[in-house]
Amino acid sequence: MVNFKIENPTTVHFGKDVMNDLGNTIALYGKKVLLVYGGGSIKKNGIYDKALEQLKSVGAKVVEFHGIKPNPLVDDVNEAAELGRKHDVEVILAIGGGSVIDSAKVISVSIPLQTSAWRIMIGLDKPKKAIPLIAVLTLAATGTEMNMFAVLQNEEANKKIGYGHQMMYPKHSFLDPQNTFSVPRDYTAYGIADLMAHCLENYFGKGEATLSDRFVHSILNEAIEYGPKLLEDLTNYELRAKIMYAATMALNGFTAYGREKGDWGVHAIGHVLSLLYDTPHGATLSIAYIAWLKLHLNRTNERIALLGKAVFGSKNSDETIKHFESFFASTGCPVRLQQAGIESREKGKILSTMIKNKVNGGHHKLSEDDLRELVDLMDQPI
Ligand code: NZQ
Ligand code: ZN
C-alpha cells in the first residue's frame, strides 16, 4: 500500500428534503449568488422553484447563467465566469448533473484568477483562490459532488479533458434522491454504467490496496443488484438513494486510497467518443469497457477473474467479461459503437483522434496497435 492523505472538505447533505437547509448554508458564504444550471430540466421538475425559494428566504441576490450542455463547453464556462466577475458574486450555486457542477467548479477558480478556463484545464494557470461552490446534484453518476475534478470540452482544440485541484471541491453538496426521480431511464442507466466504470478504473490501477478493492466490490454489488430494479421503478426513493450514494462513493477517493494511481484509459477513450459524436458519457464507457476488458483478457487475467468472482460469482475472466457485457446490455446501455449510432466507417476518425489526443491509461499503457484493436473491438458484431 502506498502512502496517502485523506482530505475531502465537501460536506454532503444526503436524504429527503435536505434542500430545506440550502438557503442557510448559502448565507454562510455570502448574499450575491451566481446560479448555474443546464438546459432547463430543473424548471420542469420543480427544483429551480425550490432553490429560488431558499435563496429568497435568506435575502440572496441572484444572477443566473443557464444553458450548460451535457459534455460541457469551455466557452460557456468563460461566459459564466465573466458574468460572475461583473456582478462580483460571493457564492456559486450549481444545480444539475456532472456537466453543470464540473462547469461551476472551473467557474469558481477562474473568476478570481481572471483567466480563461482552458488555461486552467491544461495547467498553464494554477488556481489561487476559489469562489465557494454549493452544489445541488440532480443526476447520480459522476461523483463530482464529492471530488475535485472537472471535465470540459474545447471544440476549437478538439479535446475533452479532465483537471483536478484541491480548491475545486464543492463546499457543500445537497443530494436528495427525490431530485433524481425525473432522470429518464436511459440517463439513469448511463449513470449506473459511469459509477461502475469509476470502480473499474480504480480497480485496474497500479498497486495493491485490498480494502479499496473490497469497496469496489461492494459498490459494484449495489449497482448490479439495485440498478436493474431502479430502471423498472424510476421514482422509488430507496432505489434512487442506493444508486446516488453508490455513485458518490465510487469517485470520492475511497476506491483509490492506497493505490499508486488509477488507470483511466477507458475514460480517455470515452471522451473521444463524446467529443466526436456527443455521446453521453456513461454510454461511451459501456462500449469502451467491454473492448478494454477483451484487450486485457490475457494481460491482467487474474485480476479480471477475481473481480468477476466477487461481483458475479463467475468462474474465470472470460465469464466475467460476458457478465459485464450482458449487464450493461440489459440496462439498455450500448456495448458497441453501432448501438450508439456510430457507424463502422467512423473507425479511422476515432483512431486518429485517439492518437492525436494521446489516449492512454495511467497503468495499462496503450500502444497505437492497442488503440486500433480497441476500435475494432468496439465495432465488433454482437
Ligand atoms: O441540462 P439539463 O436540463 O440539466 O439536463 C440534463 C442533461 O440533459 C439531464 N438531467 C440532469 N438531471 C436531471 C436531468 N433530466 C431530468 N431530471 C433530472 N433530475 O441529464 C442530461 C445529462 O446531464 P449531465 O450533467 O451531462 O450528466 P452527468 O451527470 O452524467 O455528467 C456528465 C459529465 O460529467 C463528466 C463527463 O465527462 C460529462 O462531461 N464527468 C465528470 C467527472 C468528475 N467531475 O469527477 C467524472 C466522470 O467520469 C465524468 O467524466
Ligand atoms: Zn465517468
Image (cartoon, helix red, strand yellow):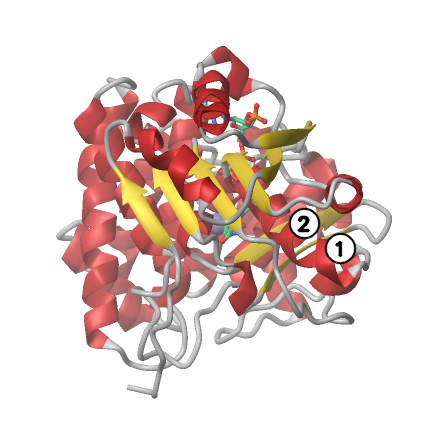
Give the farthest residue toward the front: 59
Q: Nearer the viewer, mark 1 or mark 2?
A: 2
Marks 2 and 1: in contact by CB < 8 Å? yes
Where does the image place residue 311, in percent across and percent down from the top left? 18, 52
> So how many labels did they put on this image?
2
Q: Residues within 10 Å of mark 1 (few under 14, many from 20)?
A: many
Depth check: give the residue in front, 25 or 102: 25
Residue under label 1: 117
Q: Quadrant of the N terminus?
A: bottom left
Above or below 203: residue 65: above
Q: Position of residue 237 (x, y in %)?
A: 21, 24
**Vertical order, 271 against 56 (above or below):** below
Looking at the image, is 271 positioned above or below residue 95?
A: below
- Residue labelled with disc 2: 107
Q: Is residue 317 left or right of residue 159?
A: left
38 sits left or right of 291 in the view? right
